Image (tube, helix red, strand yellow):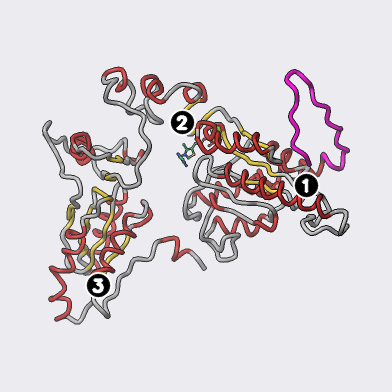
Amino acid sequence: MRATSIPAGAVPEFPELPTESLLEAYRRMTLIRVFEERVSELYRNSEVPGFVHLSIGQEAAAVGACWPLAVTDVITSNHRGHGHCLAKSLAPEPMMAELLARVTGTNKGLGGSMHIADPDLGIFGANGIVAAGVPIAGGAALAAKLRAGRDRAGAGRDRAGAGRDRAGKENSVVVSFFGDGAVAQGAFHETANLAALWRLPIVFFCENNGYAEFSPIADQHPVPMAARVGKGGNVFALTRGLHAKWPDRLLDTPISETAVMVMPSTPADTYGLLRSAILDPNPVVFIENRQQYGMKGPKPPADYLIPLGKAKVVREGTDITIVSVSRMVQEALAAAEALAPRGISAEVIDLRTVAPLDKETILGHRLRHRRRDRRAGRLPGLLDARRAGHAGGAAADAVALRAEPGEAVAARPAYDRARR
Ligand SMILES: Cc1ncc(C[n+]2csc(CCOP(=O)(O)OP(=O)(O)O)c2C)c(N)n1
Ligand SMILES: [Mg+2]
């Protein structure tokens, strides 16, 4: 397959597919649909660790795009990649195993839905980062072009041709699947530019479903960020009107990985932490869980401020500590209540700020109870409510750093336990 550019206004002519091929294409589309309906059912029953994005309604795009591809041609995909991988001949079993975190999965169950890959089949990966598959496709296309050049150069000397693919083709092509949301990303533009400059064998395949999460396409392109906030106000419309009110204070800034990161667990905490975040001179990433938007709680005073970087012991306990954050704090409190009748006294810590981590408060439990636990011949435990993100894992790391020889830290994430 060759990448071609169709002159504007021209209607490309495609040969009609014979009935047999049409039936096969329909079978592949049905396989994708049935696979995803099953995934959806499993997800609803909490049997899929991690997140899934379905491509129901987009099956024909995946099958049509992959139809002419040989096994040596390459695809890259995005977060909505089940259809692309099945269309590129990946068997459903290893993919389902990957989604269910089984070791028989394409990535040994470590990647999940957004990281399915099988390089032997030319599947260079689904990708959880919007547009991140596009430059990978650019790299694969450059490799294909270099191989093709080498193949052509060597063709006179060795007809079998090192660099010739298994199908005996001189060229292979790369199809990069991405959504309309990816078109706003720099990675897309850089790859498109280089691909045009170097005339790479790459097809940019945009599945424009009209939305990137909750943002309709009309709000995304080509309107600048500031105007978008003025109009819609982020994906849940929480900041609607802010730009109109404070045009000089709302700026389009890149996310900093080293910023302060806050994850509140109650309405009052959200208020107090948000006010502190606004006053803080550093960039602060404020992460709300939308499942909490309907949550009711006591109203704090108007001048309420909660210091950033400080965790809170939200339930006293002496046997174990459950470190949690955001919505999972409520789950941790419920778990602590459930343990009480069994004679286990659980302390619950709400991190409030995930970065920087309040190691002193997390370790406080151990310092407070270490001597007593030693006397009783017990090891203090730490449970990691990590489903809400990686904060619990970081807390476990903090404790592990301070653990003394012979002490145990129970911090295996839920999806590790699910793997078998
Ligand atoms: C760089 C980056 N920014 C934000 C996100 C969060 N996110 C996940 S899916 C998505 C929307 C993607 O929209 P689009 O590319 O149109 O794909 P669709 O979901 O519509 O298929 C966003 C913003 C992300 N994963 N990566
Ligand atoms: Mg989209």
Residue at image mark 1: 171
Q: Which residues are magenta?
A: 1-22
- Marks 2,3: beta carbons within 8 A: no
Q: Is residue 71 left or right of residue 287?
A: right
Mark closer to the chain start, 2 or 3: 2
| Residue 302, position as x, y percentages in the image | 12, 31
- Mark 3 lies on a secondary structure that is loop
Q: Quadrant of residue 237?
A: top left
Residue at 52 percent across and 25 percent down: it is 217
Mark 2 vs mark 3, CA separation in Å: 44 Å
Residue at image mark 3: 403
Mark 2 surroundings within 10 Å by alpha-carbon count, few (fewer than 14), some (14 through 19), many (20 or more): few
Mark closer to the chain start, 1 or 3: 1
Residue at 67 percent across and 45 percent down: it is 141
Q: Depth check: 402 or 169 in front?
A: 169
Q: Is residue 101 above or below residue 291?
A: below
Mark 1 surroundings within 10 Å by alpha-carbon count, few (fewer than 14), some (14 through 19), many (20 or more): many
Q: Quadrant of residue 382?
A: bottom left
Residue at image mark 2: 214
